[in-house]
Image (tube, helix red, strand yellow):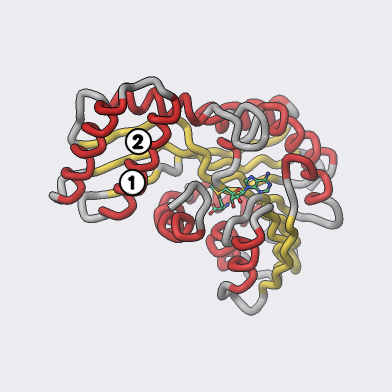
Amino acid sequence: MTGFSADWLALREPYDLRARNPAVLDAVVASLAGNNQIRIVDLACGTGSTMRALAPRFPAAQNWRLADNDLSLLARASGMARPLRVTVTTTPIDLNHDLEAALDGPVDLVTTSALLDLVSEAWLDRLAVETLARGIPLYAALSYDGRIEIAPSHQRDAAIIAAVNKHQRGNKGFGPALGPEAAKACIARFEQLGCSVVHGASDWAAGPTEREFQIEIFSGWASAARDTGDLPLPDIVEWLTFRRDQVAAGRSSLRVGHVDIFARPTGTR
Ligand SMILES: C[S@@+](CC[C@H](N)C(=O)[O-])C[C@H]1O[C@@H](n2cnc3c(N)ncnc32)[C@H](O)[C@@H]1O
């Protein structure tokens, strides 16, 4: 599975759903309680995970504009089951170049998930300016925040995690990525600009029986660590072998820190 493959997005979706912060979700839903119709733009939608998490919570009719630069993911997103009161349009777009175009037209809410850790500080600023200038609230879910707990421990965990966090700061198509700093930066920027911001933890948690998810994550981290060149290859192989053995034996558990954010311009809605 690759970074944004449909298989990986399908594997992570139940963990994302379980992790989404309920207080943040409640704040999003409450903010639009008076609307008979809600127009939502979901940035970097993948196969539409955020729509599936959020749409059932709104009793109102909804139009979701799903935006992504991956045509195959967009095609899957538009083909997936959804409540009758939900209509979907897809927008193939490179959000690094054309964020502003994705936000044009009448929009009541901008959503995104698992995107902010990929973007640069400059792009985050653009997002803040463009949403605030339009008076649109932002629900940004599942930004990785650098916290990782793995049991049982291994002597190389700290070095692998440091390499993963360094890799997270690389360019993912939006300039140098915020990586683990994304949530903090987003909260600070929107608060500075006078928004009311609700945020809370949305950690992934996987127990000993949740083997496939853990194997994918550990394999991805081993690749990321290798890409940094910071650790000798045999050390990475030894670490991954240990991790795979623990997962196979039903002894491994994992928590990965994420943060959900709802930023709402004050006085405009
Ligand atoms: C980690 S996935 C998250 C997908 C979805 N939001 C979810 O939570 O399942 C990141 C998404 O960002 C999209 N993406 C990455 N770079 C992009 C760009 N420059 N323009 C538009 N979408 C982009 C990928 O195609 C992928 O769908």
Residue placed under numbered mark 2 in the picture: 222
Residue drawn at the location 45% of the way across and 60% of the way down: 7
- The one nearer the camera, 184 or 179, is 179
Q: Residue 23 vs residue 245: left or right? A: right
* Residue situated in front as seen by the camera: 93 or 116: 93
Residue 128 position within the rendered picture, expressed as x and y whole percent measured from the top left: 74, 35
Give the x, y percent position of residue 125: 73, 30
Classify mark 1: helix, strand or loop.
strand
> Callout 2 environment at 10 Å: few (<14), some (14 to 19), or many (20+)?
many
Q: Nearer the viewer, residue 93 or 33?
A: 93
Q: Residue at x 68, y 45 (%)?
A: 138
User: Considering depth in this image, is 149 or 163 the residue closer to the camera?
Assistant: 163
Distance from the alpha carbon under mark 2 to that under mark 1:
19 Å
- Which quadrant of the figure has residue 122? top right
Q: Residues within 10 Å of mark 1 (few under 14, many from 20)?
A: some
According to the picture, the residue beneath numbered tag 1 turns out to be: 205
